[in-house]
Amino acid sequence: MWLTRSLVVLAHAFIGWALCGAIIGIGRRTTSMRNTLLIHAVGAPILFGMLSFVYFSVFAYTTPLQTAAIFVAVAMLMDFVVVARLIEKSLEMFKSVLGTWIPFALIFASTYLCGVYLVRK
């Protein structure tokens, strides 16, 4: 039971990370890096908010705080391992406040606030 529940929350986090990756990938090919990062900073919390809505409406196996922490931790880990280490072969991306730290903070906030709202209903 706990394994299934863990996989459900991790799958939601992974989907959010993959969709954010799609924003970056498409943005890099269609507009400037600055515009891509701005779109990502706006899109990331929206995407994770929508995933949080689905997660808390259907499953809600974890508290809003736990879910927000898991979602951000997965995004950070995947960015570090896949993007920084394997794709970019550099940790340079983590120097960008707009590219990483603002989206991480907004992902946490949107997930947490969505969870608090839906759990209280």
Image (spheres, rainbow, N blue to C red):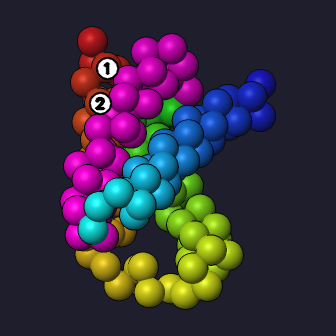
User: On the image, numbered disc 1 is attached to which residue?
Assistant: 118
Q: Rate crowding at label 2 as few (under 14), some (14 to 19) or many (20 or more) other CA atoms within 10 Å.
A: many
Q: Can residue 3 be spotted in the picture?
A: yes
Q: Looking at numbered disc 2 in the image, what kind of residue is underneath it? A: Cys
Question: Helix or strand or loop: what does disc 1 sit on?
Answer: helix
Residue lying farthest front?
Answer: 30
Prevailing SS of the magenta stretch: helix
Magenta region, residue range: 33-61
Q: Amino acid at mark 1?
A: Leu
Q: Which mark is residue 114?
A: 2
Discs 1, 2 touching: Cβ within 8 Å: yes
Residue beneath the point at 41% across and 30% down = 52
* Quarter residue 121 falls in: top left
Q: Nearer the viewer, residue 111 or 83?
A: 83
Q: Residue at x 54, y 66 (%)?
A: 79
Q: What x and y, as percent, mark residue 10?
A: 62, 41
In the figure, 92 relative to 43: above or below?
below
The image position of residue 17, as x and y in percent, is: 51, 50
Element class at badge 2: helix
Q: Nearer the viewer, residue 99 or 25?
A: 25
